[in-house]
Image (cartoon, grey):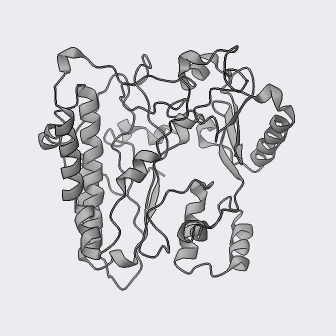
Amino acid sequence: MELLTNQPQEYSTLVYTNKTIDIIRNHNINRPLFLYVAYQSLHASYADNILQAPPDSYMKRFAHIESQNRRTYAAMAYCMDESIGNIVGELYDRSMLSNSIIIFTSDNGPMAINIPNVFSNFGSDVPLRGVKTSLFEGGIRVPTFIWSPLLSTSSYQSDELIHVTDIMPTLLEAIGGIANNTQLNEFTNNTNSYGMSQWQTLSKRMGTKRSELLHNIDPVWNQSSIRWYNWKLVQGPSDPNLAYMLSQWYPTIPIDDSQRIDMNQSARDRLKHTDRLTSRSYRVLTAMHRPLPDYNLLETSAITNCQSVSSTTETDISGGGHQCQSDREFCLFNIRSDPCEHRNIASKNRHLVSYLWNRLQKLNQSAVWPLALTPGDQNGYPDRHGQAWVNWL
């Protein structure tokens, strides 16, 4: 809760990692530990700012990447990956890892290039539709994994419906805080929780009981989205310019010939293979005699059943439907068959649209009014706290 002012020019990812390792080293291993590490790296960069990479040694690892900005982005990601590996290594050195659960997730998808006067960012969610802050898949479908020796089954990809609010009850069941279904139901009812435990779903590959995902109800931008089984409804935002910006399919990163650095494919593959084998996490898994990462699993999980944007006109879309304009109409998609949300099939499923819209309205009745719609408190402004955003109340 203290503002740091004595670490100028330090890279925040490394500062956070060092503090995390210090917490682990000074922790009594006979007591439980909950550790939440929220890195700032890979966040969006506004138009008048630039992406910032860690020290030069990280940038040199990615000399084979043609675009300077993508090279910086990769260095940022690598520094975060390496930091997580060092945390895993520290847990292992302290004999804590064999009784640990690690969850990695992101809060949203990337902000893409080619959005004028808004962000100077170089993330890519190709071939998905939408970007950070949107409710299309490009804004909400993110990398997530859970790892633990306590899991009965591992090294597989789950495509069950799991919501971020499921994390707390899942962990409670895993550590014995919820012992049976009766206690689980009591927890859900007493806390008015939207989450449900997915420990059995993940550990034993049992089917999830969840059929619904509430993506968001945002009264500030007037946009909402909900998924029911394979069906997903998207509404808004009402501002047509904002709706257009958030609903596009943004292309891959353009290559500037002046920044091109040639590197043959074999050299790229060798670099990728070497980094995997020499990573801290890989060495720890080997020492623990745990299953090593199946990188083929990651490669085969990529979304490939998407049409190109150029082929999706209202008259020639395979499977019917048309591209939606979410500021003017409801957008309904079958996410299993159309993960890139090219085909709006709302007009052919009006009863389903009505059901999902009514469900959103019912959920909204229990929503808490967002603080973004309350008057601003000038006592919280940075110029009153050494030019920093801090807790002031």
As drawn, is 96 to the left or to the right of 211? Answer: left
Which residue is drawn at the image coordinates 68% and 30% (left, top)?
222
For residue 12, say whether it is visible.
Answer: no
Which residue is drawn at the image coordinates 52% and 32% (left, top)?
128
Which residue is drawn at the image coordinates 58% and 67% (left, top)?
205
181 lies above or below 340: below
Q: Where is residue 201 in the image (x, y as percent from the top left)?
A: 60, 66
Q: Position of residue 101 (x, y in %)?
A: 43, 70
As drawn, is 49 to the left or to the right of 317? Answer: left
Q: Where is residue 372 in the image (x, y as percent from the top left)?
A: 59, 38
195 lies above or below 238: below
182 lies above or below 225: below
Which residue is drawn at the image coordinates 68% and 44% (left, top)?
369
For residue 129, say whether it is visible.
Answer: yes
Q: Nearer the viewer, residue 39 or 228?
A: 228
Q: Which of 193 and 202 is in front in this view?
A: 202
Count every numbered label the image shows and give the total: 0
For the N terminus, which image quadrant? Answer: bottom left
